[in-house]
């Protein structure tokens, strides 16, 4: 892995995202809450990975954003960038069902415009 860490780039990015949800005894909790930029960056890391599981991982993050958007504690809401990057992750995954999965994400965006 690059950078001397364990795991791949998208896995490391997702691990950093997960750490932002840790309280750390209240230290830095307010300043370091994850936002759309952080989520979209992690989704993009999966999209650029070209891995077969990239679409699944990106879509899981998109769903996580949708859940957080209903909570008052987080300023996270999937936007057009989130959906487009998730579609890109599916398209780059080279899975046989990727076009169908990408179309499902597109349909979701069209029925729930951000």
Image (cartoon, rainbow, N blue to C red):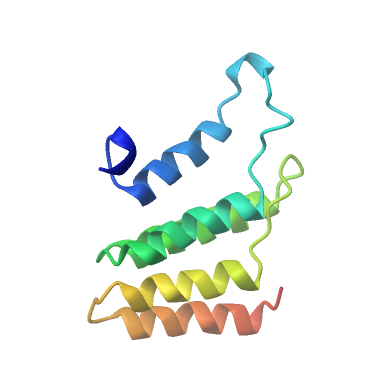
Give the number of marks.
Answer: 0
Depth check, front residue: 66 or 44? 44
Expressed as whole percent of the image width and height from the top left, the position of residue 87 reads 46, 76
Expressed as whole percent of the image width and height from the top left, the position of residue 83 reads 56, 72
Q: Answer with left or right where residue 12 lies relative to residue 85.
A: left
Q: Eyeballing the image, is 99 above or below 21?
A: below
Q: Residue at x 42, y 38 (%)?
A: 15
> Does residue 27 appear in the picture of this structure?
yes
Q: Answer with left or right where residue 100 lies relative to residue 31.
A: left
Q: Residue at x 57, y 66 (%)?
A: 82
Would you identify the image quadrant in which residue 88 lies? bottom left
> Does residue 5 appear in the picture of this structure?
no
Where is the N terminus found, in terms of image quarters?
A: top left
Where is the C terminus found, in terms of image quarters?
A: bottom right
Would you identify the image quadrant in which residue 36 lies? bottom right
Q: Residue at x 74, y 30 (%)?
A: 30
Expressed as whole percent of the image width and height from the top left, the position of residue 51 reads 26, 63
């Amino acid at each position: 892995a690059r950078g001397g860490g364990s795991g791949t780039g998208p896995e490391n990015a997702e691990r950093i995202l997960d750490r932002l949800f840790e309280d750390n005894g209240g230290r830095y909790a307010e300043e370091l809450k994850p936002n759309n930029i952080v989520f979209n960056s992690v989704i993009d890391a999966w999209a650029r990975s070209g891995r077969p599981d990239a679409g699944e991982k990106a879509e899981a993050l998109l769903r996580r954003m949708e859940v957080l958007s209903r909570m008052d504690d987080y300023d996270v809401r999937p936007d057009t960038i989130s959906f487009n990057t998730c579609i890109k992750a599916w398209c780059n995954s080279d899975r046989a069902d990727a076009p169908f999965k990408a179309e499902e994400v597109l349909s979701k965006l069209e029925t729930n415009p951000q």
